[in-house]
Amino acid sequence: MYEPIRTKSVHSTMADAPSDFPHRSREEELDIQLAGHLAALLAVTDELRALAPSADLDTAAERLAEQVARLRGGRTQDRAVASGGRREAQVVPLHRRAHALAGRALVVAASRADTAAAILSAERMDAHAAALPEPRELTPAG
């Protein structure tokens, strides 16, 4: 009624075969992800520095660049050159974006147990939250 299987299972042959592409560990994947979030935060920080220069943003940019270089094995991030020219309409959305990026970096840094990156991310979240305008209360029309 049934004929016995004469060949090996596709699943067992695939499991035994060496892979053609390299696999990364979870830690390596988290390093790559954290470096990407911090690099994006650095790019937004550089944009903010160009629109509204400040010593706090300069310090933050340098610290972010150090962390990105550390996570990328010493490779440095290309940086934007800061120049003056405050445009309030652009600054607020950039602070919101930077706050969100710092939050993502904080989540990955925490799961990776990277204290330095987690502290830096939390500090940047606080700084960008403080730079945002206070939400207005809605008053009932009546």
Image (cartoon, rainbow, N blue to C red):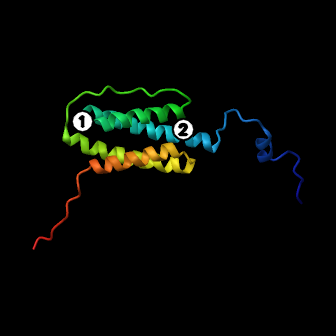
Left or right: residue 56 versus residue 37 is left
Query: Residue type at mark 1?
Result: Ala
Residue drawn at (9%, 74%) of the image: 142
Front one among 109 and 26: 109
111 with respect to 122 (left or right) = right
* Number of residues whose C-alpha sits closer than 10 Å to that of mark 2, classed few (under 14), some (14–19) or many (20 or more): some
Question: Please, is residue 76 above or below residue 33 in the view?
Answer: above
The answer to whether residue 19 is above or below residue 99 is above
Q: Which residue is mark 2?
A: 32
Task: Report helix, strand or loop for mark 2.
Answer: helix
Which numbered disc flags the more N-terminal residue, 2 or 1? 2
Left or right: residue 141 versus residue 134 is left
How many residues crowd around disc 1 within 10 Å: few (fewer than 14), some, or many (20 or more)? some
Residue closer to the observer: 122 or 3: 122
Residue 97 in the image, given as x and y percentages of width and height: 34, 45
- Count up the numbered dots: 2
Mark 2 vs 1: CB contact within 8 A: no
* Residue 3 in which image quadrant: bottom right
Residue at x 23%, y 56% (from the top left corner): 134
Residue at (20, 42) in percent of width and height = 89
Q: Is residue 30 left or right of residue 47?
A: right
Q: Which residue is mark 1?
A: 52
Counting from the top left corner in percent of width and height, residue 16 is at: 80, 41
Q: Position of residue 13 (x, y in %)?
A: 80, 42
Q: Secondary structure at mark 1?
A: loop
- Looking at the rendered structure, the kind of residue marked 2 is Ile
Where is residue 107? Give x, y as percent: 49, 51
For the N terminus, give its image quadrant: bottom right
